[in-house]
Amino acid sequence: MILYGNSVLNANGELCIGGWRVSDLKREFGTPLYVYDEDYIRASIQSYHSAFAGTGVDYALSYACKAFCTVAMCQLAREENVWLDVVSGGELYTALQAGVDPAFVCMHGNNKSPEELLFAIRAGIGMIVIDNFYEIELLGDLLEQENATIDALLRVSPGVDVHTHEYIATGRQDSKFGFDLYSGQVDQAIDRLAAYPRIQLLGLHSHIGSQIFDADGFRVAASRLASLCAHLGRRYGIWFRVLNLGGGMGIRYTSDDSPIPVERLVEGIVQAAVASFREYGIPLPRLMMEPGRSIVAQAGTTIYTVGSRKEIQGVRTYVAVDGGMTDNPRLALYGAKYEACIANRANDPDMETVSIAGKCCESGDMLIWDVALPKPTPGDILAVSCTGAYNYSMASNYNRVARPAVVFVRDGQARLVVERETAADVCRLDRSLRGPTIESLG
């Protein structure tokens, strides 16, 4: 298993993260446990700032909260001069609970409810990304009701098909997100916006997908959006101030993945945007990007305790741990791959190939298929790397399993940022069959 950030093996061959031995983390906080290297998160953000600053363009970074959203993470992002992208009322509430200035919050979503839009308006968020015609009318009416205004971007589906899993490709023409570039929907949206002057249109937004390993798709998107900006400028006299090219930058999960360095990726994106806008003779708007996975994924490690074992001679050996698809559903959802080690004796030689199973009552509850490890024994600590994105975010209570705790580690200090759920927490909102009833109004 590749070691990321401040992860090292000590003299006894035990994995240490942020100055903490995993055995001590297990003893203090239990397992399963999400462990985040705080310095590595900060360094990942700073690598984007440094890369953009080196290009000389006006830019802003916005952290995609869907990757990993907690009060502590929202606070960390703002400390590193990053906006927050939220996609629900719950994520917005988390950002506000973190004390984040709502002026640095941007809200996405393809079906924002009236309640969520009202929450965003009343909170005074900095920007909203309009996704469809229904939302134009809904948002416009709510702003009139509230006697308020809001800055907005139009999300455009630029017809860019990047090489990634179909479930996380979001920039195709056939997508549930945004206004279609090729059928004239953006022009139609501009026409409709004329009836809602409280929506102040600042620019365009696109997001072409996730786990992208090069700048090619971003180059195509930048070119098409520059052409669109030139067209809208000529037709409507609108010259946009913001161009948000989304996120989706990939990371290394296993040796099969080969992402390019952030510096090269940013340089390629910026060069394409500058050249495209120069070609059309129009000024380059402020560039925004929305990294999420690439900020937190490699900073996160999940540790488990090894339990049962099942050997099927000539077929497969299963080793079960005390977590599974309830804390990491990504393999079950779209075949995600991971690396792992026996963290309490990581220097021991690999002795066998096993498959890591979860504890849920599903055959598909698997974490890793066919990984070479020292022979796992009950009580060993299994560490799975690169679990910082979309693991905690997607965790569930399937089989009434309580969700794990989350710990930030830094310079030998550990901070519990999300408490472990209990069985009582899982049942907290349940109500008895013998409780009060409500009569129908029909």
Image: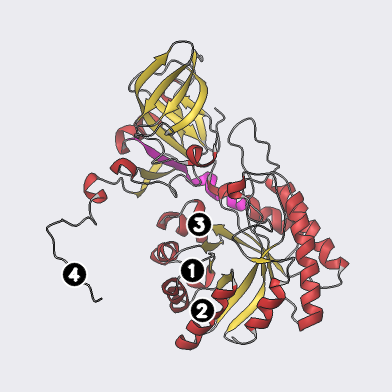
Q: Foreground residue, 81 or 333?
A: 333
Q: Which residue bears the numbered disc 3?
A: 65
Rendered position, 255 above or below 230: above
**Kind of residue at badge 1:** Lys
Q: Nearer the viewer, mark 3 or mark 1?
A: 1
Instruction: Tell me which segment is drawn in magenta.
Output: 31-46
Reading the chain from its start, which is encountered first: label 1 or label 2?
Answer: 1
Q: Nearer the viewer, residue 127 or 24?
A: 127
Mark 3 or 4: in front is 4
Q: Which mark is residue 438?
A: 4
Left or right of 278 in this view: 408: left
Label 1, label 2: how far apart the Cα atoms are: 10 Å
The residue where tag 2 is placed is 138
Q: Quarter-wise, where is residue 34 in the image?
A: top left
Residue 48, percent across and down? 65, 53
Q: Is residue 442 visible?
A: yes
| Closer to viewer: mark 4 or mark 2 | 4
